[in-house]
Amino acid sequence: IKAANGRVLQATGKGDLKVLFPMGAGHEPTKVMLKGVYYSPEFAFTLVSVGTMDGKGFHVNFGDGKCTVYTPKPSRRVIGRIPKSNGLYRIMLAQKGTSDAAEIAVAASGKLTISELH
């Protein structure tokens, strides 16, 4: 996994992860299952690839201090309105009371093959 600062971190597992996309004040968050998530114990936070979301048909719009996430066509409905906080757009794990690492470690139940490590 290549970080924004150019540092390369080793992924040790791959699995599915439930997250909550906030919808704004007074609205329930949207539960989303991210599939094929790579796990690296070196990451302090869970990172979501906008490029991967785009490749799967989702539409992501950044502006006015928020990130708006839409489902793929043809429905194109809003599933997230994520506010910017200290320069980041933060989402929560669906299971409360666990750390990112603990939740992802459970999700990343599959071992990586040698081809997935590159």
Image (cartoon, helix red, strand yellow):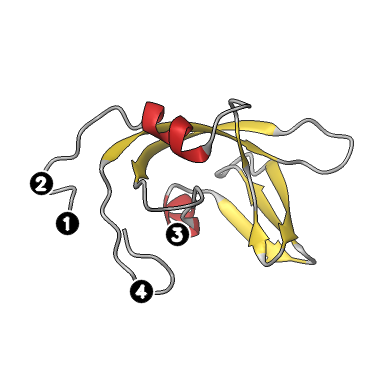
Disc 2 target residue: 114
Nearest the viewer among 117 and 43 is 43
Image coords of residue 83 (percent x, y): 75, 55
Q: Is residue 105 above or below residue 82?
A: above
Disc 3 target residue: 51
Disc 1 target residue: 118
- Relative to residue 78, is residue 97 drawn left or right? left
Q: What residue lies at 35% left-to-right and 74% top-to-bottom?
A: 6
Tell me the amino acid under the disc marked 4.
Gly
Q: What whole-number distance in Å separates the C-alpha atoms at marks 2 and 3?
A: 23 Å
Q: What residue lies at 58% left-to-right and 53% top-to-bottom?
A: 59
Instruction: Decide: few, some or many residues near mark 4? Use Cα within 10 Å; few <14, some 14-19, many ≥20.
Output: few
Tell me the amino acid under the disc marked 1.
His
Q: What whole-number distance in Å separates the C-alpha atoms at marks 3 and 4?
A: 17 Å
Q: Earlier in the sequence, mark 2 or mark 3?
A: 3
Residue furthest to the bottom in view is 5
